Each structure stands twice: as structure tokens, then as C-alpha cells.
């Protein structure tokens, strides 16, 4: 809620400011994201038989952002703002007789710093590129744990621990503290601009975020943690210039 109030406040301020300085524009964007695994399979202890292993696959999320754009010229502009992004991976973690299937969800606040270039005043395509900085808000792993009790070696005909173990269990873990709170990367974007009416311009765009910093969990031996991954995301957005 505080983020939404902040965005509305930025819009009101920028709208008033741009009345005197026409070089400044604001824009609100939203759309889906597709998270791309940095590695499809990660082994926590490489070379160890039945050691912890995590398989990643693509999943979908969403984003919305508020952008402030400064037009340096008719064809070149600088823009930045706030982007709330929810990314998701499908994960399949295996360790000896246990397997966890679920989703790793990551909520982030991106701050882009892009240069936008218009190919031609008569061509509605624009190219943008630049760094981004990411602040981690929250990560969570949620899914189902499967335990193969037949594979567990124990002493005694009736081990009370094994008898009480449920072979199918739900889990929902907050893993925020196991990841760095800050990372960064590079982005490239292609825009198509068009007019909705005489007063409102709209943009359809695609953006690829390439994470540079490896996000490594602090608990390297825990199978509940996805240890090695970066922010590789593809975003398809729709924007309205305000």
C-alpha cells in the first residue's frame, strides 16, 4: 500500500512539474514476466551420490512500474523510476529419499537507469538500454515434500520416527534472509509507440533483464534453498504516457 501511495504521489508531482518543463514526461507500465533459469540443474555438493540437487524451470510473474523520462532531444531521452517485479521459478529439489516440488517466488523493487533512442521521428520504434539496481523485498518457497520411507535405513523393526513421518507434506518457507538484499544487472528494451487518442500515447515493449551478480543463498547445505541463480527475466509490458 505504501508503494502505491508513493507512485501516486510521484505521478501528481511530475504532472505538475511537466506543465512548466515539457522535456519531462511520466509513464505507467504493467505486464507479465517470464523468469529464465540461470542454470537448469544445480548440485549443492557436486560429485556426492544422492547429494542435494535442484532443477529449475521457467515460470510466470508480473510487474508494474512508474517511470519519469527526461527528453534530452527529440530522439534521445533518459529515464528512471520504480519497478515492482514478482518473479517465479518452478523448482524440483532432490536429496536422497526426499523430493520437494514447488515454486520459488521473489518480490523485488527494481530501479532502472536507461538511455532511450528513437530510430526516427517517422518510425515509432525506440531502443533502450542501461543498468538496473534491484532491492529484494521477499522470497518464499512453497510446494509439496515427498518422502520415500521405503528407502530410509533404520535400526529396529518399528522405528517410531519413521512410523510418524508423513510421506506427503506441504511446505511454505520464508527464505528472504538466505539471499542478498541487493543485486544489479543490465537491461535492453524495444518499444513500439502509438497514439490511443489525441492526448494519450501508449507503448508496447519487451525488456530483457540480465543479472550480473550471482545471488547465492547463505545456507549452502540446505535443500530448502535455491542456492545459485541470477535475475534473468523477460518482460512484456504495456505503458501509458501520463
Image (cartoon, rainbow, N blue to C red):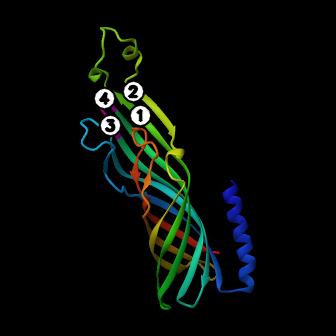
Distance from Cα at disc 4 to Cα at disc 1: 14 Å
Foreground: disc 3 or disc 2: 3
Range of magenta residues: 93-98
Whole-percent x, y for residue 116 in the image: 51, 81
55, 229: nearer the viewer: 229
> SS class of the residue under badge 2?
strand
| Residue matched to label 3 | 94
> SS class of the residue under badge 4?
loop
Circles 2 and 1 in contact, beta carbons < 8 Å: yes
Q: Quadrant of residue 97?
A: top left
- What label sits on residue 168 in the rendered view? 2
Which residue corresponds to the image point at 59% horizontal and 88% vertical from the top-left?
72
38 to 218, vertically: above or below: below
Whole-percent x, y for residue 194 in the image: 52, 80
Distance from Cα at disc 3 to Cα at disc 1: 12 Å
| Residue matched to label 4 | 97
Residue found at the far top of this picture = 157
Foreground: disc 4 or disc 1: 4
Whole-percent x, y for residue 179 in the image: 49, 49
Q: Quadrant of the C terminus?
A: bottom right
| Residue matched to label 1 | 144
Q: Quadrant of residue 74?
A: bottom right
5 to 43, vertically: above or below: below
Q: Is residue 97 magenta?
A: yes
Left or right of residue 151: residue 92? right
3 or 2: tag closer to the N-terminus:
3
Q: Quadrant of residue 103?
A: top left
Distance from Cα at disc 3 to Cα at disc 2: 14 Å
Left or right of residue 195: residue 168? left
Amino acid at each position: 500500500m505504501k508503494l502505491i501511495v508513493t507512485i501516486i504521489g510521484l505521478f501528481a508531482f511530475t504532472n505538475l512539474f511537466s506543465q512548466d518543463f515539457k522535456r519531462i514526461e511520466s509513464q505507467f507500465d504493467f505486464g507479465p514476466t517470464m523468469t529464465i533459469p540461470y542454470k537448469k540443474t544445480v548440485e549443492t555438493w557436486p560429485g556426492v551420490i544422492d547429494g542435494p540437487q535442484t532443477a529449475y524451470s521457467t515460470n510466470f510473474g508480473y510487474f508494474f512500474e512508474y517511470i519519469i523520462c527526461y527528453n534530452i532531444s527529440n530522439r534521445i531521452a533518459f529515464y528512471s523510476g520504480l519497478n515492482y517485479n514478482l518473479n517465479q521459478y518452478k523448482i524440483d529439489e532432490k536429496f536422497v529419499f526426499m523430493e520437494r516440488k514447488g515454486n520459488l517466488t521473489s518480490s523485488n523493487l527494481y530501479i532502472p537507469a536507461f538511455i532511450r533512442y528513437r530510430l526516427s521521428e517517422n518510425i515509432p520504434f525506440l531502443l533502450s538500454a542501461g543498468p538496473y539496481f534491484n532491492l529484494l523485498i521477499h522470497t518464499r518457497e512453497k510446494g509439496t515434500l515427498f518422502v520415500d520411507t521405503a528407502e530410509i535405513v533404520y535400526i529396529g523393526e518399528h522405528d517410531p520416527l519413521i512410523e510418524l513421518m508423513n510421506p506427503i507434506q506441504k511446505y511454505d518457507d520464508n527464505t528472504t534472509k538466505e539471499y542478498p538484499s541487493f543485486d544489479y544487472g543490465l537491461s535492453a528494451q524495444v518499444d513500439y509507440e502509438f497514439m490511443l487518442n489525441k492526448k494519450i500515447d501508449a507503448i508496447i515493449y519487451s525488456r530483457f533483464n540480465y543479472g550480473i551478480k550471482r545471488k547465492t543463498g547463505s545456507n549452502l547445505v540446505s535443500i530448502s534453498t535455491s542456492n545459485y541463480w541470477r535475475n534473468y527475466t523477460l518482460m512484456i509490458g504495456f505503458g501509458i504516457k501520463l
